[in-house]
Image (cartoon, rainbow, N blue to C red):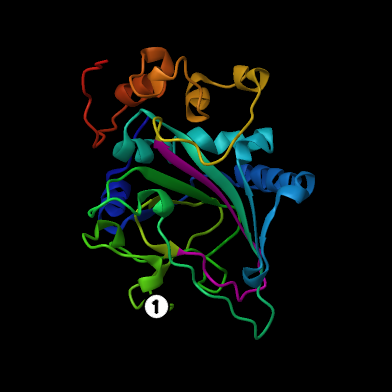
Amino acid sequence: MFDAPAERVTELAENGYTVVPDALSPEQVDRLSAAMDRALERRAGRIREEPAKRRSQLFGIPALDAELIEPLALPTTLPIVCAFLGWNIYMYHSHLDINRPLPPGEESTYVWHRDMQSATYTLPPPLPLLSMKVGYFLTDVTSPDRGSPMVIPGSHLSTTVERAEDFAQEQPTANPVLAPAGSAVILDSRLWHSVGKNHSDVTRKVLYYAYAYRWIRPSDPLHLSEEQLAVLSPVQRQLLGAGTTVKGFHLPRDEDVPLRSVVESGSVTHLTLDAPVTS
């Protein structure tokens, strides 16, 4: 059943984030962690390094390893995304995230930000909801010293103009997102958040998949071949940006959005409105 638990939807609407326990099975955690390691080894030249944070990233991850396509359309998380964005969506951005332990005595800074802020900074408040990001924890982040994401609950509902430079390092209302491996965090793109500081002896590993409306341009080129797309499900192809025509991203036909029938066959009530298609 394609179902969005009411408590997760309510928490996400009120706080701007929610944690989904057991979003991945232990077997999926192990398999995806191995795929992440393979991607880092194969694409070492493409890794984005932040030495001051002991952080490494790779973007466009479904193209890095076939196993990394699976989290795109999981029944544990996708219905919650659809409850907010509806069915005319795709993955516009993705990255794997390695947060290594800081050496003793070394510090890093918080970089408070909203996702998509470089694209939405000219919009007047309140900002519209344009994206949701799902992060899958492949290691335990059950204590705040493990570099878990830091979030400012409720900041997605702000009605004032805010810039990253206005945020002090220490935010009294900020919380670490704590969860065991296999959990997922779902973030409203308007929520102010930051990478946490890893003062543990554990390397934190997360896979992030960000969804947006299909008429928003992608942030990462995937370069998946027709042969690679052909073996995937129709919903997976939609979420990877496939479509029949350019106009179909704005005025989709049924073949453009197979996710629509999945959503409508389940019990997900989404916040978006179904409007008649007009040219």
Residue 176 coordinates in the image, percent (x, y): 44, 68
Magenta segment range?
194-212
Is 128 drawn above or below residue 88 in the view shown? below
Q: Give yes or no for residue 199 being in the magenta stretch.
A: yes
Residue 123 in view of the camera: yes
Q: Give yes or no for residue 255 being in the magenta stretch.
A: no
Label 1: which residue? 168
Along the line of sight, the residue nearer the viewer: 58 or 22: 58
Count of residue discs: 1
Residue 75 coordinates in the image, percent (x, y): 44, 35
Question: Which residue is rendered at x = 77% and y = 50% of the image?
Answer: 44
Residue type beneath disc 1: Ala
Image quadrant occupied by the C terminus: top left
Question: Which residue is rendered at x = 72% and y = 44% of the image?
Answer: 39
Left or right: 60, with 76 as reference point? right
Along the line of sight, the residue nearer the viewer: 159 or 22: 159
**Element type at marker 1?**
loop
Residue 94 coordinates in the image, percent (x, y): 54, 44
Image quadrant assignment for residue 277:
top left
How many neighbours does mark 1 have within 10 angstroms: few (below 14), some (14-19), or many (20 or more)?
few
Image quadrant assignment for residue 86:
top left
